[in-house]
Amino acid sequence: MSELPTKYRFARPESKEKRDPARLDFLYPPRMEMRNWIRSARKKADLTQEQLGEKLGVTKGNVSAWENGRHEPSYAQIQEISVVTKYPMPDSQPSIGSTSALDSKDVAARVQEMLTETGMDASAFAAKATVPLERVEAWLKGAAISVEDAVAVQTAFGYNSAWVLARVGQKKAAIQYNDEFRPKGLGKRKRLAVVGMAQLGDNGFWADIEYPVGHGDGYIDWPTSDPDAYAIECSGDSMRPRIKHGEFVIIEPNHPIQPGEEVMVKSKDGRVMVKELAYKAAGRYTLLSVNEAHGKITLHEDEIEKIHYVAGIAKASMWRPD
């Protein structure tokens, strides 16, 4: 049969459901074509195209167009067809070669890679992922991984399920955990005395201007459980964007500190700094700058007068006079 002249050709819009720009179509094993599913559902219910159309509130021509593949029904209409004909939804139909549809050429290599990185053997890996040991052993021999098992591996170890299935995308999932939200109480609000001012100095340091004990300059209303908590007013912009001029640093001296947290450090030579504690080793503190324009600094514990936990930053509007 000769090809139709160009003027008689027409383009049929591609169904959105069939496009997968992310190239993750391998996650969805091929199912029965929609037109075949509609025809099978109608015949299973012993209905003509006209009778099915009447039950759905559409014409015989609409049903015919669906079964010929010229158009597709909406998802709501698909659900209605399933109810009317008592035929299972397309998504619940058995997949056609679902395991062979996945790229399992290097399943064993991927699984061995995960075992090496987690430092586990197949038994421990299976136990943590809550999958049968026999299944993990089968993967090590090249057997395909199901979508459900890939999700279980992602939940247990954080490996991207798409990568587990076919080495697609990033190895680690962007979101690994979905922990239950368990908010903790911040403690009762207290009036924290502003006991001094941290003023901009050279190299990102601040010169501490302390007031006599008991003679603070106003207070900050702040939730804390530390009885010795206090506030320091910040002057200058050396700590922007983390801390702005006129804001207040809330200090909790009795709170334990650990690497990765912000701390207020006062050295014995009078410098006052707000830094991020990187680590402490051999009696020396390594501190990272809040402002990336300034480098890291290392101080021996003998050089430090005090190092206190920074609980938060209070806006200037939170200040209240005595």
Image (cartoon, rainbow, N blue to C red):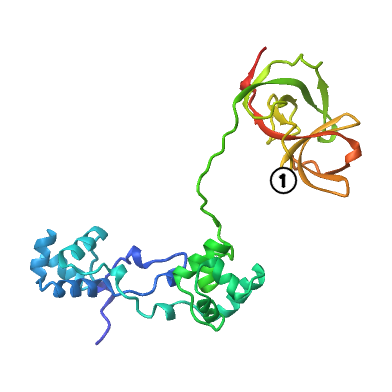
What's the amino acid at mark 1? Gly
- Give residue 206's position: percent from left, percent from top: 81, 29
The local secondary structure at tag 1 comes to loop
Write down the quadrant of residue 176 in the picture.
bottom right
- The quarter of the rendered structure image containing the N terminus is bottom left
> To which residue does mark 1 refer?
260
Residue at image position (55%, 84%) is 141
- Give residue 286's position: percent from left, percent from top: 82, 46
Front-most of 289 and 180? 180
Residue at image position (68%, 36%) is 242
Circle 1 Cα neighbour tier, 10 Å, few/some/many (<14 / 14–19 / ≥20):
few
Q: Is residue 143 above or below residue 249?
A: below
Write down the quadrant of residue 213 in the picture.
top right
Q: Do we see residue 168 in this rendering?
A: no
Image-based side of 185 in relation to 277, left or right: left
Image-based side of 286 in relation to 269, left or right: left
Image-based side of 15 in relation to 240, left or right: left
Numbered disc total:
1
Q: Is residue 58 above or below residue 203?
A: below
Q: Farthest residue in the bottom direction?
A: 1
Q: Is residue 260 above or below residue 66?
A: above
Residue at image position (71%, 25%) is 231
- The quarter of the rendered structure image containing the C terminus is top right
- Give residue 76's position: percent from left, percent from top: 24, 58
Residue at image position (30%, 65%) is 13
Q: Do we see residue 30 in this rendering?
A: yes
- Give residue 210's position: percent from left, percent from top: 81, 20
Q: Is residue 77 above or below residue 232?
A: below
Image-based side of 153 in relation to 100, left or right: right
